[in-house]
Image (spheres, grey):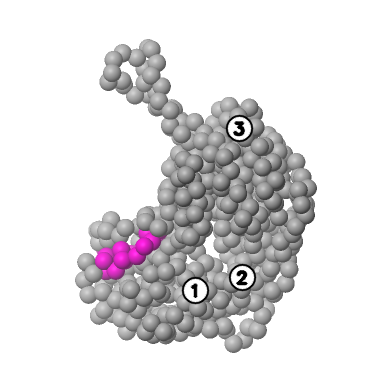
Amino acid sequence: MNAVQPLPDVLITHPDKLYINGVWAAPETVRFTDIISPHTEEICLRVVEANEADVDAAVAAARMAFDTGPWPRLSPLERAAHVRALSAALERRLPELARAWVDQIGALAAMAPFVIGGGKAAIDYYADLADRYDWEQERALTSGPGRGLVVREPVGVVAAIAPWNNPFGIMAAKLAPALVAGCTVIMKPAPETPMEAYILAEAAEEAGLPPGVVNLVPAGREVSDYLVRHDGVDKVSFTGSVEAGARIGAVCGERFTRCTLELGGKSAAIVLEDYDMEEAANALAQTITMSAGQICATLSRAIIPQSRKEDFIGALSAAMAAVNVGDPFDAASQMGPLAMERQLKRVEQYVSVAQHEGARLVTGGRRPPHLYRGFYMEPTLFCDVDPAMKIAREEVFGPVLSVLTYKSEEEALAIANNSPFGLYGAVFTNDNEAAYRISRGVRTGTMGQNAFRFDQALPFGGFKQSGVGREGGPEGLGGYTELKSLMLQA
């Protein structure tokens, strides 16, 4: 095995405690969750679970820090200085964060530092944005003399709930804008991936953030539901499944609690006639196997010209079959395991249903024969897929790509939009005008040209069942604020 540059062991100081009100506190009752390596199927860490009483304590601490503490009363630049201190504390923990991601979900060790670096970049972005953001805007009054001001104030106590697939990057993208806005935060990581949130809490302590500004309560579904329903929470920021997001949205609607929901996707890649089919195939093979396809925005539908079908499928099947699946610590590996056994079974079920519905399995669809341990799956390609099939409409969250064909641009757009989701998409063409036209025609939150890419400066979120609200960019910061209008005498 060719190992990548070694990543250090993860050193969590208090896995048996919760971080509440600036101290590491023992939980009300002692119950632990085992964190299972998807590569070895062995326990790599055991962390404590919060219960409802612990959530009450965390909300009370965040509530007091917001209602009577200094945090929301600091200037944005003062808060940004604290966020920069948090970033500095995280800097030396970046290799540990990378190792945590590999240990918990089987991500490639070679790729982990870049993904973790993206999470830290989000923190730095929002610290820098504090000085440029439009916190106060003056407007001319139409009702008579005086001075009109529109100001942004922090929304309050935030429950930040992150998923298991990118636990550091997504939690960082919630925590940083919330803090810069003046909110206090209760971090609730996914039960399968709590390590990164522990490191964030340790960094917050090292950075000297005031007590109660950042709190940590790792918990399962029932306690998470209790947190969402808690009347001391002013906003819920959630990334995860459509089913969980629908429940959270309903609860927030009952209480008029603000919420941001970043949910699932079934993103389409539209390949136009002018683009090189082999280049498109290689790009899509790399995208669908990135993090074993466990990315909400991944391009899982390829929509290609009917006239180029055979060329494209030949190139794509060859590219996917050539992906080296194996040990995430091996430099030769190009895809690691799925994150957990239940996820592997979910993907296998979708493969079975797709074949039953008449889709043709071109390559993959099974455990790699040389891997006897771990939750591994071959990169899987289906063609002859009808837009009404489950494999074309539902989020698989695995390395499974479906190919659909079109005969006209209008049909390509109709197929892309024939989805309950609208999170991401891409168009592969060398014609920039066509790229703009297609991008405007797809009902989705983000479109890329000839690549699967993101940018901190742009808002990210979805149409339809892909969610409500946006994260990233100035819009992501705005989501943690309330607008207030002031009408003053001159």
Picture disc at residue 340? 2
Q: How far across and down, in percent of the image, does residue 227 sit?
A: 60, 47
- From this viewpoint, is residue 126 visible? no
Is 424 colored magenta in this rendering? yes
Which residue corresponds to the image point at 43% horizontal and 28% vertical from the top-left?
484
Q: Residues within 10 Å of mark 3 (few under 14, many from 20)?
A: many
Q: Amino acid at mark 1?
A: Pro
Tell me what residue is drawn at x 37 percent, y 55 percent: 463
> Residue 399 has which mark?
1
Say which residue appears at 66% left-offset and 45% top-offset. Answer: 55
Sequence-first tag of 2 and 3: 3
x%, y% of residue 440? 28, 56
Distance CA(mark 1)–CA(mark 2): 14 Å
x then y, percent, for residue 271: 31, 70
Callout 2 amino acid: Met
Using the rendered view, name the quadrant where residue 357 is placed: bottom left
Relative depth, front residue between 407 and 366? 366
**Residue highlighted by disc 3:** 66
Image position of 358 (left or right of 44):
left
Q: Residue furthest bottom?
A: 369
Q: CA distance from mark 1 to mark 3?
A: 43 Å
| Total count of labels | 3
